[in-house]
């Protein structure tokens, strides 16, 4: 093959350069590849499913790129409608805007109702509990910031749905117990409201005022629910809530209103076990309030409210009146010492220091400042405490006297059922009464005993002995017992006449309440009202012959003869107790020993028992019964008693009588 010429090679290179120049002129390389998109990039991408969005691609470790597709977040139509309404009505104000808002609220409420309709009752209850727990948690976490939650719970407590109202009422009890301070929040004056204070003080004041306002609304609701007769269950819940708050928030605002709610449950003793549990809890709360109160402010409220409720119809149980037996305030009260102390503090005219007008004015201002400071500290002075003690004692004794008079003069049976509790209270607090009031009590008690013994109806031996024991207790426990001598002959005569009925009492060794003796380990138990008839008899005889001046030799002989006659019919324990008392009586009045022998009788005539056929219409006095002519032949029968202890007792009395006659 021949070699190509050098000129041919140049021609080929020239043609190649021209071809490249032609390509440049056609515009293939004139485009901006960095900024312009290619044709395939301008085409829309298709996705496999609807409502999906293209995400950022993921590059794997091997270099492959994976496409990411996720579902789109679809907004509800209500939000879109609200956005459109907001965009369309940005400049519109007035009635149209309010109508649109009302329609939107109505639609949202309807949607919530529809959602709740779809839930089961159990799910609704769970949601309600979660909502209440959430609100309570916010209040416990930061009450000042979340005070709106307290208002929300108060509104839920007034709901027509009984379940919602019950849960809200119960939830508010621990909330108020934790939020309420240990002092009383007072109302701000107009001057205090106008003055400028720091932000912290203003915030605290606003919180306290809102707390008191919500608390008052809550107590008003409780007072309304307790009286509800349509829903008994929620009434019990309200009663329990009031008891819890009354026992815990005794120094907070509106405590008297709580006491009224609690005392209102004591008007009738319920028979239903659930209602009885609330009744018992109310009694326990009132008793604890009286026992723990030292200043007297709470005691005054309890006694005042309880007295007002009892006086309405006296239709209450004895347990409600026995609450007053737990008064701690009157244990160290002595009216006579208080009066004498006041007299000592009185400055005589000659010892007074002359003060100028300026000094008197300064002294008056200092007294006012000290009073304001004591009110701010909520301290109770000794004078205020004594004033509270006097007010409580007056209210209690006045209530007792009115109950006794209502049972006698008005013939109120409900008041008569409270005589036992009244007499127990008189035995405890009667020693503090002045002599004028003491005389009124003696007259009323003597009238009660006279009505029972003079009538033809069967004598209530227990009530009669209660009156006699109370009379002696009032006399012996009074501060001026040694200054004035009171004749108790009428009381002794009534006890003497009732001995024949006492011997025929089948329940002489049992309590009138439960036919069982009270538990001796219980503290602060009544000492008279739960006592047996035998105990009341021995207590009255002991007060007559050993603790007062009413015991005479003639009365000792007459009572000994009567007691021997009744011991033949008494149970073994009561008979043994009577024999021991006669032995104690013989040691003080040795003349009783002459009644054990017919040869040593010191009396003339015949012994008048008082139950003879010709004397049934007459009342034989103790002094005129001629007990010196009596003979204790009953001791021979007791010597044959089936109980060996009674036999030994009768023989020891016979031996003691022989020793006294030597």
Image (tube, helix red, strand yellow):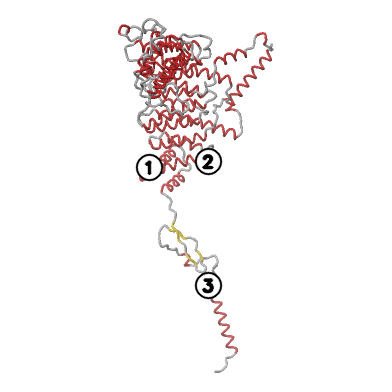
Asked which quadrant contains residue 513, the reply is: top left
Asked which quadrant contains residue 239, the reply is: top left
Q: Is residue 558 visible?
A: yes
Q: Residues within 10 Å of mark 3 (few under 14, many from 20)?
A: few
The disc placed on residue 219 is none
Which one is earlier in the sequence, the residue at label 1 or at label 2?
A: 1
- In the image, residue 170 lies at what x, y percent? 44, 36
Q: CA distance from mark 1 to mark 2?
A: 31 Å
Rendered view: 424 above or below 435: below
Q: Residues within 10 Å of mark 2 (few under 14, many from 20)?
A: few
Is there CB contact under 8 Å for labels 3 and 1? no
Which one is earlier in the sequence, the residue at label 3 or at label 2?
A: 3
Q: CA distance from mark 3 to mark 2?
A: 74 Å
Q: Which residue is mark 2?
A: 141
Q: Secondary structure at mark 1?
A: helix
Q: Which residue is mark 3?
A: 28
Q: Which residue is mark 1?
A: 113
- In the image, residue 326 lies at what x, y percent? 48, 24
- In the image, residue 380 lies at what x, y percent? 57, 23
């Amino acid at each position: 093959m021949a070699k190509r010429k050098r000129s041919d090679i140049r021609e080929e290179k020239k043609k190649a350069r021209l071809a490249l120049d032609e390509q440049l002129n056609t515009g293939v390389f004139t485009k901006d590849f960095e900024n312009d998109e290619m044709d395939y990039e301008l085409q829309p991408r298709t996705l496999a499913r609807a409502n999906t969005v293209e995400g950022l691609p993921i590059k794997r470790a091997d270099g492959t790129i994976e496409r990411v597709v996720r579902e789109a977040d679809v907004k509800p139509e209500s939000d879109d409608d609200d956005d459109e309404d907001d965009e369309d009505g940005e400049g519109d104000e007035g009635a149209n805007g309010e109508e649109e808002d009302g329609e939107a609220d109505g639609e949202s409420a309807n949607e919530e109702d529809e959602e709740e309709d779809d839930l089961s009752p159990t799910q609704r209850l769970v949601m309600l509990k979660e909502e209440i727990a959430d609100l309570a948690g916010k209040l416990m976490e930061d009450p000042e910031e979340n005070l709106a939650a307290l208002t929300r719970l108060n509104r839920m407590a007034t709901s027509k749905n009984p379940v919602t109202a019950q849960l809200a009422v119960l939830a508010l009890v621990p909330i108020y117990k934790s939020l309420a301070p240990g002092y009383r929040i007072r109302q701000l004056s107009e001057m205090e409201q106008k003055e400028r204070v720091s932000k912290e003080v203003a915030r605290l004041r606003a919180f306290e005022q809102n707390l008191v306002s919500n608390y008052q609304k809550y107590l008003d609701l409780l007072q309304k629910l307790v009286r509800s007769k349509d829903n008994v269950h929620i009434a019990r819940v309200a009663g329990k809530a009031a008891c819890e708050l009354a026992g815990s928030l005794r120094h907070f605002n509106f405590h008297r209103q709580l006491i009224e709610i609690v005392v209102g449950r004591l008007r009738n003793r319920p028979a239903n076990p659930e209602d009885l549990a609330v009744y018992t809890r109310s009694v326990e709360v009132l008793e604890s309030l009286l026992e723990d109160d030292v200043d007297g402010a709470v005691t005054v409220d309890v006694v005042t409210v309880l007295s007002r409720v009892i006086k309405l119809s006296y239709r209450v149980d004895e347990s409600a009146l026995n609450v007053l037996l737990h008064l701690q305030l009157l244990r160290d009260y002595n009216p006579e010492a208080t009066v004498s102390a006041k007299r000592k503090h009185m400055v005589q005219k000659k010892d007074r220091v002359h003060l100028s007008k300026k000094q008197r004015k300064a002294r008056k201002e200092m007294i006012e400042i000290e009073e304001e400071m004591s009110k701010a500290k909520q301290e109770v002075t000794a004078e205020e405490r004594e004033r509270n003690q006097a007010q409580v004692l007056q209210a209690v004794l006045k209530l007792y006297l009115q109950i006794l008079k209502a049972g006698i003069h008005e013939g109120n049976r409900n008041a008569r059922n409270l005589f036992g509790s009244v007499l127990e209270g008189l035995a405890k607090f009667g020693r503090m009464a002045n002599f004028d009031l003491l005389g009124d009590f003696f007259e009323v008690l003597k009238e009660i005993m006279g009505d029972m013994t003079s009538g033809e109806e069967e004598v209530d031996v227990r009530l009669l002995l209660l009156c006699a024991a109370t009379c002696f207790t009032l006399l012996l426990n009074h501060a001026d017992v040694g200054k004035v001598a009171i004749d108790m002959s009428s009381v002794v005569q009534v006890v003497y006449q009732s001995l024949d009925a006492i011997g025929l009492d089948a329940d002489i060794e049992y309590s009138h309440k439960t036919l069982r003796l009270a538990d001796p380990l219980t503290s602060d138990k009544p000492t008279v009202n739960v006592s047996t008839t035998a105990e009341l008899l021995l207590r009255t005889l002991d007060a007559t012959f050993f603790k007062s001046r009413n015991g005479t030799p003639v009365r000792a002989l007459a009572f000994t003869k009567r007691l021997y006659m009744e011991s033949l019919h008494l149970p073994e324990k009561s008979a043994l107790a009577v024999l021991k008392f006669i032995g104690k009586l013989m040691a003080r009045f040795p003349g009783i020993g002459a009644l054990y022998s017919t040869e040593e009788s010191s009396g003339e005539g015949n012994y008048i028992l008082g139950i003879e056929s010709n004397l049934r219409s007459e009342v034989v006095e103790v002094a005129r019964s001629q007990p010196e002519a009596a003979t204790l032949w009953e001791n021979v029968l007791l010597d044959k008693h089936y109980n060996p202890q009674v036999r030994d007792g009768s023989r020891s009395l016979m031996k003691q009588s022989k020793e006294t006659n030597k």
